[in-house]
Amino acid sequence: MNWSLGIGMTDFFISYTGVDRAWAEWIAFTLEEEGFTTVVQAWDFRPGGNFVLEMQRAASTADRTVMVLSDDYLRSEMAAPEWASAFVQDPQGLEQKLLPIMVRACQPPGLLKPIVQVRIMGMDEATARDAILAGARRTRAKPSARPLLPGSIAAPRHKEFPGPDTVPCQPVRSVLPKLKVPLTDVDRRRFAKSAFATIRAAFGANLEQAVKEDGRLDFDITDSTATDFRAELFLDGASKGACRVWLGGMMGDNNICFAEGRISGDGCNEILTPATSDDELSLSATMAMGFSDFERQTDMKRLTPEQAADYLWERFTRGFRR
């Protein structure tokens, strides 16, 4: 049967957008393996043809239209006329003219929202194939084989389609207790650098948020190096708080130092030191005196990087709030 000559009807017109071409071809091949006929742009629109006329002919000579659903498909201006042609022939869905197959998570809007979809995201190949064929047959979707016992582990399947590489399965419980691994100098160095990055990001975000909340505020934040920055907060153009935060110094390469105001040299008001407790790294504030509510309510010897960022921000803005 040559669909391009208008001879006979095809079973399915595969409507898709370019980024989902691999899915469209896999779906078309799956349907044709089962004896259905399909029209798919990648295979049937040949060089020299008129794209618009080919699309109109494909939509009008197909019994049903497969929608390869994704966010890209829903945003495509070219895809809308393709599914609309089938929709107007069967607005109530009694003949199942539209077969939406969701290959990537999306939220069909408007008229498409109530149409039942075949969702194959995250499925292995065999399961996805069965789901598509069940939707294509217009019959009751009872499986041909007994379903697996819920909670049992499925055997891995060979991958030859655009879906996941492996079948999700339950993790195997270890028969051994978790073995303790001593923390190394490399672990401490990486932790310190990660904690500094968390503090730097928090200061940047907090300063921007403060300016949004009060138009009288302004700020300046300057990175001297990748592990050394200075921040300053202004009210009506007047400086109301300044600090420097840096990694390393005379007290140790993995320490995070904090200096309020414009202290010269490496003098500081606080040093956060990586500490080990229960085989986990945290930060210990060596100069916390319990003056603020934050210090009284928090274990200052076991700070997470996020807590450390809040602590230093509280110290930075303490004078501003007075």
Image: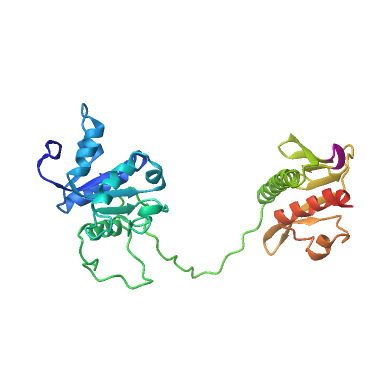
Return the residue found at the far top: 48
Q: Nearer the viewer, residue 193 or 98?
A: 98
Taking the image as shown, residue 315 lies to the left or right of residue 158, namely right
Taking the image as shown, residue 259 lies to the left or right of residue 306, namely right
Q: Is residue 237 inside the magenta stretch?
A: yes
> Which residue does the image show at 38% across and 71% down from the upper left?
151
Principal secondary structure, stretch drawn in magenta: strand
- Does the rendering let one see residue 216? yes
Q: Is residue 156 above or below residue 152?
A: above
Taking the image as shown, residue 250 lies to the left or right of residue 170, namely right
Residue 304 location (% of width, % of height): 71, 57
Q: Is residue 183 inside the magenta stretch?
A: no
- Does the rendering let one see residue 274? no
Return the residue found at the far bottom: 149
> Which residue does the image show at 38% across and 56% down from the upper left?
113
Q: Is residue 7 above or below residue 182?
A: above
Which quarter of the image is occupied by the N terminus?
top left
Residue 135 location (% of width, % of height): 25, 59
Residue 249 location (% of width, % of height): 81, 42
The stretch of residues the image draws in magenta is: 235-241
> Which residue does the image show at 74% across and 46% down from the upper left?
203
Q: Nearer the viewer, residue 1 or 174?
A: 1
Residue 180 location (% of width, % of height): 61, 63
Taking the image as shown, residue 264 lies to the left or right of residue 190, namely right
